[in-house]
């Protein structure tokens, strides 16, 4: 029953509260100090906790269908310009229902949902023109293109903060199905400040940090499109 769900939910909340020392809250009683603004899909399988940190006071979370900046501009602006988080992460994910709907058709959804899905026509437009052996492949290619598109939007909107070194925009992909061979539940980087290849990134970093970056990128960066990987 709905009551049973509600009762269990709040019982669990009390148990969670007991695990926290009261001093835990002191740091952010008056003001939040997150270091990440994260734009993620509303999909229940994708949560800020995938990074293994407590999101409280660390992640300013913005969620909508298809992890789209345009549908939550005010919230993203607040995180970047007001809270001044050094990182803006666009977190897409494999098997995205919003992308699937945008490719298949969604005329039976509510007007509000249609309006939000309509904005996906821009990033997936070119993908639609290609031929794929399987629809699944089209979806995954569109997922990547959408992440790149959102990063590009962010770079245009927050150009000054990026150029001054105050902000880094990260395009990331949550792979809970092991489609990229790194194991279920891995988060991969596909775009860093508009750069889509390891070579481009390595050319921009300081020479003394290049080896560290190379090791990091080898583990976490995916530079090929879905069809090329």
Image: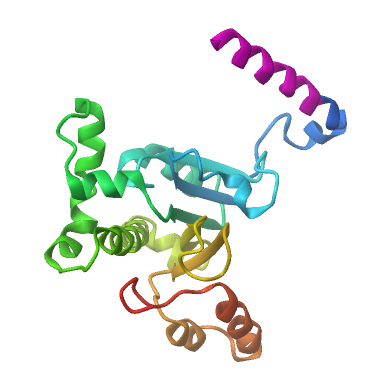
| On screen, residue 8 above or below 36 | above
Q: Residue furthest bottom?
A: 207
| On screen, residue 145 above or below 4 | below
- Say left or right for 101 vs 88: left
Residue plotted at (19% across, 42% down): 118
Residue 5 on image: x %, y %: 60, 16
Residue 108 on image: x %, y %: 17, 29
Q: Quadrant of the N terminus?
A: top right
Question: Does the magenta segment cover residue 115?
Answer: no
| On screen, residue 218 above or below 137 | below
Query: Image quadrant of residue 190?
Result: bottom left
Residue 181 on image: x %, y %: 52, 71
Residue plotted at (19% across, 37% down): 106
What range is drawn magenta here? 1-17
**Secondary structure, magenta segment, majority class:** helix
Front one among 40 and 224: 224
Residue plotted at (61% across, 51% down): 50
Residue plotted at (58% across, 65% down): 183
């Amino acid at each position: 029953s709905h009551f049973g769900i509600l009762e269990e939910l709040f019982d669990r909340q009390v148990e969670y509260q007991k695990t926290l020392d009261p001093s835990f809250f002191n740091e952010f009683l008056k003001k939040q100090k997150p270091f990440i603004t994260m734009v993620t899909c509303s999909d229940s399988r994708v949560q800020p906790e995938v990074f293994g940190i407590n999101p409280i006071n660390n992640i300013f979370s913005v969620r909508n269908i298809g992890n789209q900046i345009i549908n939550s501009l005010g919230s993203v602006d607040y995180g970047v310009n007001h809270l001044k988080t050094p990182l803006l992460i666009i977190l897409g994910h494999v098997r995205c229902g919003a992308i699937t709907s945008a490719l298949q058709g969604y005329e039976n959804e509510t007007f509000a949902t249609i309006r939000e899905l309509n904005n996906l026509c821009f990033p997936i437009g070119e993908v639609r023109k290609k031929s794929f052996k399987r629809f699944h492949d089209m979806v995954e290619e569109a997922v990547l293109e959408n992440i790149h598109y959102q990063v590009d939007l962010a770079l245009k909107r927050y150009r000054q903060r990026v150029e001054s070194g105050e902000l880094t925009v990260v395009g990331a992909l949550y792979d809970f199905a092991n489609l990229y061979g790194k194991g279920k539940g891995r988060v991969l980087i596909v775009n860093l400040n508009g750069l889509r290849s390891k070579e481009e990134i390595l050319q921009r970093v300081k020479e003394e940090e290049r080896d560290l970056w190379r090791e990091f990128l080898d583990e976490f960066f995916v530079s090929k499109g879905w069809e090329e990987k």
